[in-house]
Image (cartoon, helix red, strand yellow):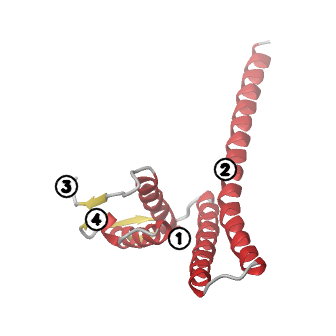
């Protein structure tokens, strides 16, 4: 009887974990689908407008810039999905490398500035050199998410400061 109870509890625990995993996967798919559909809907609207009515050269230039931004956004989203899939694999010793953190942060800042069409002065960097042994894709995702959240959830005119210092351990 005790063995059956332990087996039942184990089965129940595994079932709950599976349900939670399915829920997280479903939420992730919903979120990704929304993120992919937004630039596609925008592109479709611009293209329909260009096909249905005449627009000035200024409007056409603005539409082209906006469509290029949307295509860039789609490209970044797809790259991020591919990065996330790579992170899902179990790491091996070959996956780690010397990662220069300041360079990663600068690249992430440039991406955020383009994505949100921000003036470079919105994000202030004060970085010292630093190297970690890690999976570059993981380090990149961490800093990209931090910067994206800092800009996304701040006022309409964000001011983000990033400071990196060496500490003694």
The quadrant in which residue 7 appears is: top right
Q: Residues within 10 Å of mark 2 (few under 14, many from 20)?
A: few
Percent of width and height locating residue 43: 69, 72
| Circle on res. 168 | 3
| Circle on res. 28 | 2
Q: Which residue is mark 1?
A: 94
Marks 1 and 4, Cα distance to the nearest angstrom? 34 Å
Q: Earlier in the sequence, mark 1 or mark 3?
A: 1
Q: Is 101 located above or below residue 25 in the figure?
A: below
SS for tag 2?
helix
Percent of width and height locating residue 128: 24, 68
**Quadrant in which the N terminus appears:** top right
Q: Earlier in the sequence, mark 4 or mark 2?
A: 2
Marks 4 and 2, Cα distance to the nearest angstrom? 31 Å
- Count of numbered circles in the view: 4
The quadrant in which residue 120 appears is: bottom left
Residue drawn 62% across the image and 73% down it: 75
Nearer the observer: mark 4 or 3; the answer is 4
Q: Earlier in the sequence, mark 3 or mark 2?
A: 2
Marks 4 and 3, Cα distance to the nearest angstrom? 24 Å
Residue drawn 44% across the image and 50% down it: 153
Q: Earlier in the sequence, mark 2 or mark 1?
A: 2
Q: Which residue is mark 4?
A: 124
Q: Residue furthest left?
A: 168
């Amino acid at each position: 009887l005790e063995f059956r109870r332990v087996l039942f509890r184990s089965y129940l625990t595994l079932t709950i974990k599976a349900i939670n995993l399915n829920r997280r996967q479903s939420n992730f798919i919903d979120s990704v689908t929304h993120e992919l559909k937004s630039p596609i809907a925008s592109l479709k609207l611009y293209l329909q407008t260009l096909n249905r009515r005449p627009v000035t050269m200024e409007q056409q230039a603005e539409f082209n810039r906006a469509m290029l931004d949307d295509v860039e956004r789609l490209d970044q989203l797809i790259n991020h999905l591919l990065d996330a899939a790579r992170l899902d694999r179990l790491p091996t010793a070959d996956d780690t490398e010397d990662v220069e953190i300041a360079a990663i942060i600068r690249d992430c800042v440039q991406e955020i500035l383009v994505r949100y069409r921000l003036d470079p002065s919105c994000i202030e960097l004060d970085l010292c050199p630093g190297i970690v042994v890690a999976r570059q894709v993981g380090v990149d995702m961490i800093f990209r998410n931090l910067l994206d959240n800092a800009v996304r959830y701040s006022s309409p005119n964000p001011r983000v400061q990033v400071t990196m210092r060496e500490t003694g351990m």
